[in-house]
Image (tube, rainbow, N blue to C red):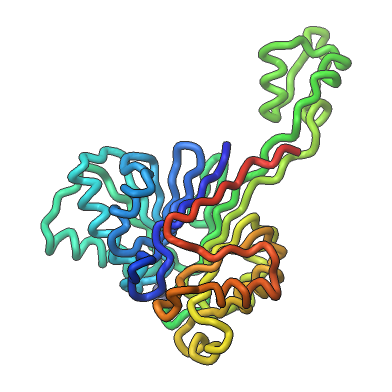
Amino acid sequence: MSIHVVFLGTAGSVPTLQRSLPAVLVQRGNEQFMFDCGEGVQRQMLRAKTGFHKKMKIFISHMHGDHVLGLPGLLQTMALMDRQRKLEVYGPKGISDFLLCVKETLQFGLTFPVEIREINGAGVVCDEEEYTVSAVQSNHVVPSLAYALVEKPRPGKFHPKKAHALGVPKGELWSELQRGGEVTLSDGRIVRAEEVLGSPRKGRKIVYTGDTRPFDAFAEFAAGADLVIHDATLDDSLAEKAAVDGHSTPSQAAEQALKAGAERLVLTHISARYPDAQVLLEQARKNFGNVVLAEDFLELELPLPED
Ligand SMILES: [Zn+2]
Ligand SMILES: [Zn+2]
């Protein structure tokens, strides 16, 4: 199962002609994860052909307008399109009041249930069969969260020769072993999955920082990530301003990705002062080779590792 990442909005604070406000959509199988929800996100979704009816969880990093004002419009568009499936929204304190207040004052009815979960503190915020989503307090000018989508390890590769050698007949018993279970053979012997499977295969990990200065807990939180999507609002020459505004520079983002041992880095939340943001990419590249500058509609693929 491939993981597909689409950058729907990559601007910081205000939209520009090239960049819409922050939103990243991760598509994993039939399920979507949206990180932040900037204004006009539904039009970006139309252009990216993401659909509006899929299973979806939305994760809001913090309660600044550029990250959250897309939610009311998105919910209303989904209702007008007669969405039926439940939508889950996770975010910091305030997300619940915000949505309830908008819903009441604008008096729009929804055709689908919305489950809102406010996150207090760090840890796993969502634990499903195949993955978890965790949050950690980041370091912005208001309470803010970074998120990690982490796939659980998959059972190791099945070795048919070993199963044959142990006398396990092909069929249902093989399937059970492939799922990680144990089986009892007709002669009473028990064969366990470990005897016929390779070592468990690591899942993929995607980390989204939201708006943040570099912070200490990041290296552990993002350890070994396949993809880190990091705030890089201002270039290195404006490091002082970035610190005051609660943002990061490209070199800082690169350093954080390096400390975490991440595979790939994407710089986003790009300030409107960079119609050409190549300078950000160049600054990050000095510390970290595998880096990309986010653009609206940039798409990345994270294939399933085959070991
Ligand atoms: Zn922002
Ligand atoms: Zn902010």
Give the left or right position of residue 233, taking residue 188 as reference.
Answer: left
Examine the image and state in which quarter residue 279 appears.
Answer: bottom right
Q: Is residue 70 above or below residue 185?
A: below
Q: Is residue 123 visible?
A: no
- Picture coordinates of residue 134, whole percent (x, y): 54, 58
Q: Note whether 191 is above or below 82 in the view shown.
A: above
Point 26% across, 38% down: residue: 84
Decide which of 34, 84 is in the foreground and name it: 34
Q: Give the camera-side residue of 96 and 207.
A: 207
Nearer to the camera, 152 or 67: 67
Could you tell me which residue is drawn at 29 percent across and 53 percent down?
A: 42
Side of 276 where 83 appears, left or right: left
Residue nearest the observer in this picture, 150 or 45: 45
Q: Where on the image, by quarter, is ligand 1?
A: bottom left
Classify residue 258 by image quadrant. bottom right
Q: Is residue 157 visible?
A: yes
Image coordinates for residue 168, horizontal then vertical, percent: 79, 13
Q: Quadrant of the N terminus?
A: top right
Residue at 34% of width from left, 42% of height from top? Answer: 51
Q: Residue at x 40, y 70 (%)?
A: 11
Image location (x, y in percent) of residue 236: 58, 84
Single out the residue that lies furthest toward the top: 186
Q: Position of residue 25 (x, y in %)?
A: 44, 52
